[in-house]
Image (tube, rainbow, N blue to C red):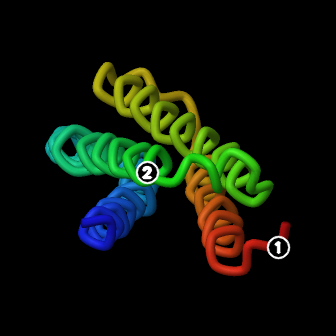
Amino acid sequence: MLLWIKAFHIISVITWFAGIFYLPRLFVYHAMAEDEVGKERFKVMERKLYRGIMTPSMLIAIGLGIWMSVENWAYYKTAGWFHAKMLLVIFLIGYNHMCGYYLKVFAKDANTRSHTFYRWFNEAPVVLLFGIVILVVVRPF
């Protein structure tokens, strides 16, 4: 059963990251949009991506991750790499919530940031992904 949980955890993490990589890219294009039809289209796309894919995937990934951790807590509670990974996951959850905040800003037509800001904002989850994958696979400590 644990392998099924792990498989679905990995699938949910992949779909979560797909949204995490795509939503800020939509913010880049939305910040550059000048026509009302385009802006309204981005609002719909952003909302559907955040509420329909990102947030459910995040919740499933967290739930399955907790399930796997509980199943082998005797090992995980002393594994340093696991604690470091959890810290990065907390940052990733915070990033997801920041995306939700920017979604609301765009929905209210209140964005004051440039497309360049969102291009840089889009790079942060790459660093988190590298760290998380290296910690899980290499388990350096």
Query: What amino acid is found at the position of numbered circle 1 in the picture?
Result: Pro
Determine whether the residue tagged by mark 2 lies in a helix, strand or loop: helix
Separation of disc 1 and disc 2 at Cα? 22 Å
For label 2, the crowd category at 10 Å Cα-Cα, with few meaning under 14, some 14 to 19 and many 20 or more, is few
Query: For the point 60% across and 66% down, which residue is it?
Result: 129
- The residue labelled by disc 2 is 71
Q: Please tell me the numbered disc located at residue 47.
A: none
Q: Quadrant of residue 80?
A: bottom right
Query: For the point 34% across and 42% down, which residue is it?
Result: 63
Q: Please tell me the numbered disc located at residue 140.
A: 1
Q: Quadrant of residue 12?
A: bottom left
Query: What amino acid is found at the position of numbered circle 2 in the picture?
Result: Glu
Number of labelled discs? 2
Q: Quadrant of the N terminus?
A: bottom left
Closer to the eye: label 1 or 2: 2
Q: Nearer the viewer, residue 3 or 125?
A: 3
Q: Quadrant of the C terminus?
A: bottom right
Q: Which of the two labelled residues, at mark 1 and mark 2, occupies the earlier sequence position?
A: 2
